[in-house]
Image (cartoon, coloured by chain):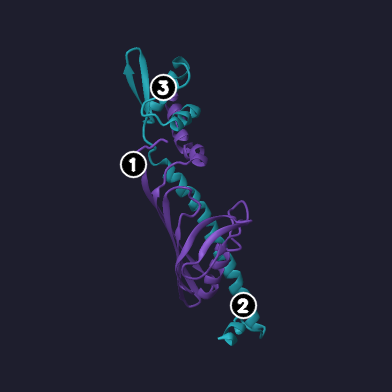
Amino acid sequence: MGAVVKEGVMQAFEIVREEEIAAPAEIVFETILEQMGPLNSTPEKAMPMVLEAWPGGRWFRDLGNNAGHFWGVVQAIKPPSLLEISGPLFMSNPAVSNVQYRLTEENGVTRMRFVHRAMGWVGEQERQVESGWSPMLERIRAAAVERAGRRR
Amino acid sequence: MGEIVVRMKRAQPAVSRPAVSQHPVSQPMGVLGWVGVVTAVRRGRHRMYRLEGGGPWPVREWMRVFERYWNYQVDQIRQRAEVKALERMIRLEDGGDDGTTETKEEE
C-alpha cells in the first residue's frame, strides 16, 4: 500500500451561463427535467438519465442489471423556478459539484441562469491524463517553434 | 516530446530521469525547461529533471469538458422549450387546450 500526502491538488471552477428563452417558465422547467433526464445527451450521443424530481431524488445513469453511475442528488427543487443538484457528477475524483438552474419569467420570456461550481481534487485521473496535458503540449510546441524561429 | 512528459507524470517521482538515453532527449528537455514544465538539476555527470507540479491544466481540462456538455444542454433546453411554447400557442389559437387541463382537473 502506498500512502502519499498530496498537496496543491484542491482546486475549484465555476461555469455560468445566462440565457433568455422565449417560453414560459413552466415550459422551460419541464424541458430542463426532460433534458437532464430521459433526453440527456452529449454533443456526440444520447445518454439517458434518471432524474427523480423531488428533494433528495437521485440523478443517475441506469445501465440495467444493477449497473449504473450516480451523478448527484436533488438538493433543492421549486417548480418552476429552481432546480439544484449536488454530487460528484461524472468525476471519479474526490470532488463535489453544485449545479443550479434558476428561472425568472417576465412577459412570457424566461431568463435562465445556469451555474455549475465544482471543488475538490480536480486533478488528473487515468483516463484524462493524455487529454489533460494536451494544452501544455500545445504550449510546448508553440514555444519550440518560436525558439526555432529565433535561431534562424 | 509529449511521450516523455506523460511517462514522467505517471511515474510520479519527485526527481526522475527519463527512461531513455540522455542524448536524444537533451534538446526537447531543454524546451521543456524553457517553458517551465521541468527544471534541471545537475548531479555530477548527470542532469536530473524535475517535473513541475500539475499546474492549472487538469482543472482547465475538466472545466472544458463540463463547459462543452452544459453549453450543449442549455442550447437543447432553449430550443426545445421555445418549440414547445410555440406549439402550445398554436394549439390555443386553434381552440384546443394548452396541455395543462389534465393537471388542473387532477388538482
Residue A15 visible somewhere in the drawing:
no
Instruction: Kindly identify which chain the residue marked by label 2 belongs to.
Output: B
Task: Identify which amino acid the numbered label 1 is placed on.
Answer: Gly
Please indicate, yes or no, whether residue B61 appears anywhere in the rendered image: yes
Graded by Cα atoms within 10 Å as few (under 14), some (14 to 19) or many (20 or more), the crowding at tag 3 reads some
Asked if marks 1 and 2 fall on the same chain, the answer is no
State which chain is coloured purple: A
> Are the residues flagged by discs 3 and 2 from a single subunit?
yes
Q: Label 2: which residue?
A: B88
Residue at 41%, 22% (x, y): give it: B17
Crowding at mark 1 (Cα within 10 Å: few <14, some 14-19, many 20+): few
Left/right of residue B88 with respect to residue B1 in the rendered view: right
Foreground: A150 or B99?
A: B99
Q: Colour of chain B?
A: cyan
Q: Kindly report the distance in space between the C-alpha atoms of the residues bearing marks 3 and 2.
A: 67 Å
In the rendered structure, the residue with mark 3 lies on which chain? Answer: B
> Which of A56 and A149 lies nearest the eye of the viewer?
A56
Q: Are marks 1 and 3 on the same chain?
A: no
Residue B52 in the image: x percent, y percent?
36, 32
| Vertical arrangement, residue B98 with respect to residue B55, above or below | below
Q: Position of residue A4 (x, y in %)?
A: 36, 37
**Circle 3 sits on which residue?**
B17
Lateral position of residue A96 relative to residue B72, left or right: left
Q: Which residue is mark 1?
A: A8
Amino acid type indicated by mark 3: Arg
Quadrant (top left, top right, bottom left, bottom right) of the C terminus of chain B: bottom right
Q: CA distance from mark 1 to mark 3?
A: 23 Å
